[in-house]
Image (cartoon, grey):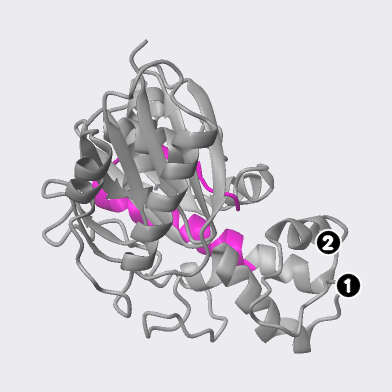
Amino acid sequence: METYLGLDLGGTKLLIGEIDSRGNILRYKKYDSGYFNQQAALDIIKLSLDDYIKTVGWYDKKPLAMGVGLIGRVDPNQGIWLQIDPSRTQPIALAKELADIYGIPCHIDNDVKSATRAERVWGFGQISKNFIYLNIGTGIAVGTVVNGRQIRGSHFNAGEVGHVRVGVNVGIKCTCGRVDCVEAIASGIGFDRCARILQKDYTTDLHIPADKGERIPVSEIFALSRKGDPLCVKLVENASEALANFVMNLVRVTDPETIVLGGGVVADGYIHAKIMELLNPTTMRFVSNGVVITKLNPEFIGLLGAGAVAMNM
């Protein structure tokens, strides 16, 4: 049986697994990653992949190819991982090194662009050649497909749209240096930072850890918002308005048929419903397939994306 190996490297975990050409996940294993630079990440990948081969093994024979989804800027044509962020820039020829070590052709791409590939091959891309995949998780980024082709930009940095302002004023400084970017308000990190800033102005039952390294789960904010907790209601209102404005801005840029939402923040559908209430019908009139949550499993869309990268699709 022909299979493909996918590696989905995130900020806290590395998921390794095999898939077939129809997008079925045949087997997988999860590894901790933690904070890393690019060289440390390569070491994590090699140690984890060695363990995977030893403890899980191939589903049948050696996979036809390997695909890796990575944080940050990636040159998929040359197989070079350019940087994680401006403070962690150490270009590394990751695809060649892994291919040489394991004897399997290797392709790499950015994690959200990889997930967009999965959406194009097995998700809403089957009915739409013009769509935006909007990932709302720890951070916010998009993959944009126009006439069936994904936009990458001159420096492979297209889609880092979490760093735009969307008319919601909290007074929170973003890591990019601007104030009130959508990522600083509506991502997993954004919910945490906004809760800490606004807690003095609202009563709340939300537990806010003193250790800023311990992030407040968005699921807890949503649960308390449903119960009318004043702080959590405000956090959800801000994020919903920010995301609705954000979606409408994106629609004006590329004229998509479909907006596909993915990532942990939208997975349960709670904030999706609130976003929908705030969308202007005139602005959204040409988005014929609507604003929808991905049909692909949010826990594994990164792994499926890495598989699509392996297939070079």
Residue at 24%, 33% (x, y): give it.
Answer: 104
Residue under the image location 75 percent in, 85 percent down:
210
Tell me the residue that label 2 is attached to.
Answer: 224
The stretch of residues the image draws in magenta is: 238-265
* Label annotation for residue 4: none
When the figure is inspected, residue 111 is found, relative to residue 160, above or below; the finding is above
Q: Is residue 285 visible?
A: no
Whether the residues at callouts 1 and 2 have beta carbons within 8 Å, the answer is yes
SS at mark 1 in the image: loop
Residue neighbourhood size for the residue with mark 1, other residues' Cα within 10 Å, grouped as few (<14), some (14–19), many (≥20): few
Front position in the image: 232 or 119: 119
Q: What residue appears at the point 62 percent right and 43 percent down from the top-left corner?
A: 267
Q: Nearer the viewer, residue 58 or 292?
A: 58
Furthest residue toward bottom? 200
Residue 205, label in figure: 1
Horizontal relation, residue 9 to residue 128: left or right? right
Q: Main secondary structure of the magenta part?
A: helix
